[in-house]
Amino acid sequence: MRVSTKLFIYCISILLFVGSISAMLFFGYKTFYIVPDTSKAENYSYHFALVAEETENNYWRLVEKGAKRAAAEKDIYLEYIAPSKADNDQLLKLFDRMIAAKVDGIIVQGIEGERFVDLVHKGVERNIPVITIDTDVPSERKAYVGTDNFYAGQLAGRYIIENTKGEQHVGVIVGRFEAINQQERLAGFKDAIKAHPRIQIAKIKESNITEIGATQATYVMMKQHPEINALLGLSALDGLGMVEGIQQIFPTKDVLITSFDILPETMKLIREGKIDATIAQYPEEMGSMAVDVLIDLQNRDLVDNKIYTKTEIIEKADLQVKPEVAR
């Protein structure tokens, strides 16, 4: 082979190699780094990010609504991002991207594990205040805003204690076993009923925070444990699924149903008498308060870094007095 031909082949090979490396670096950069949207954020006093559990989850949309309302009132650009479906790995990647984007503050659902703790540290190192919302995790986060989940579980237990007689076999549905807020609510419920041996947990199942998952969990629980005469759901869509599951397997059975959250669909079922009560937490209030806390953290740390929002029991009788509770 002539020297000139060899040289040409070598040059082409080098160019292809350099091109491949450049493309890999470029697309890797685009995949794992977010440049702040300065076209939108530059005219605002601050740019905050709200990293939620799931994009179209009704509960998180209410959190977003409250946060964006507060942000608009205070000249702040708020960016709402979340995985399309609940996925801790994806949520942590989005959290990391917001740190890389150098936003002025981050509101994020707490995720148990060293990776989350390390990301909080990374944000703090870059002078980005991080606050947890809905679920807290021990870390360098500057504050937690949301429900006292252990207390919320206790409320559910007290409701069942006060509104039943005789033996109660409770079927419990949690959104996700790994979620800290679900674990805390379940622990609070167990604490409330421990002095009442007539109330026993028959089965605990997971809904994967979907209505159909709660329906399936209810059906299976009731089939395996027909003695169940009380149901408790610990995440927002569980109440809706429990009602459907009961209709599928025991449509005429009298079962006390206690749900969680005040989604409009849940309030409708309470008015219809299909759900007996719900543990109300106020996600719009959480979102609004979280923005206010982030503003305060721009200039100083907080003395009280656990800010609990209101939690209460809502029954049908309450809706006649407080029709706006569903918001």
Image: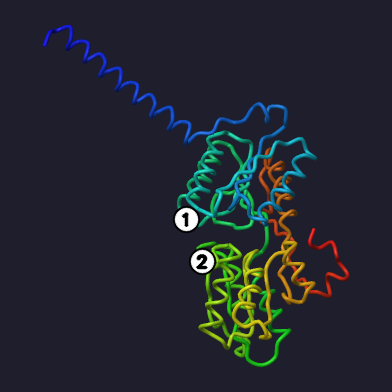
Residue at the location (56% across, 66% down)?
213
Q: Nearer the viewer, mark 1 or mark 2?
A: 2
Q: In this view, does 8 lie above or below 97?
A: above
Which image quadrant for residue 40?
top right
Residue 177 is marked as 2
**Label 1: few (<14), some or many (≥20) within 10 Å?**
few
> Which residue is label 1 attached to?
113
Compared to residue 162, the image places residue 106 above or below, namely: above
Badge 2 crowding class, 10 Å Cα cut-off, few under 14, some 14 to 19, many 20 or more, is some
Q: In which quarter of the image is the C terminus?
A: bottom right
Percent across and percent down for residue 208 are 54, 63
Image coords of residue 187 (percent x, y): 58, 73
For the residue pair 325 and 157, the one nearer the viewer reads as 325
Dot 2 lies on which element?
Answer: loop
Question: The N terminus lies in which quarter of the figure?
Answer: top left
Residue 320 figure quarter: bottom right
Up-down relation of residue 300 to residue 281 (above or below): above
**Spatial CA span between label 1 and label 2:** 14 Å
Which amino acid lies under the numbered mark 2 shown in the image of this protein?
A: Phe
Element at label 1: loop
* Mark before the other along the chain sequence, 1 or 2: 1
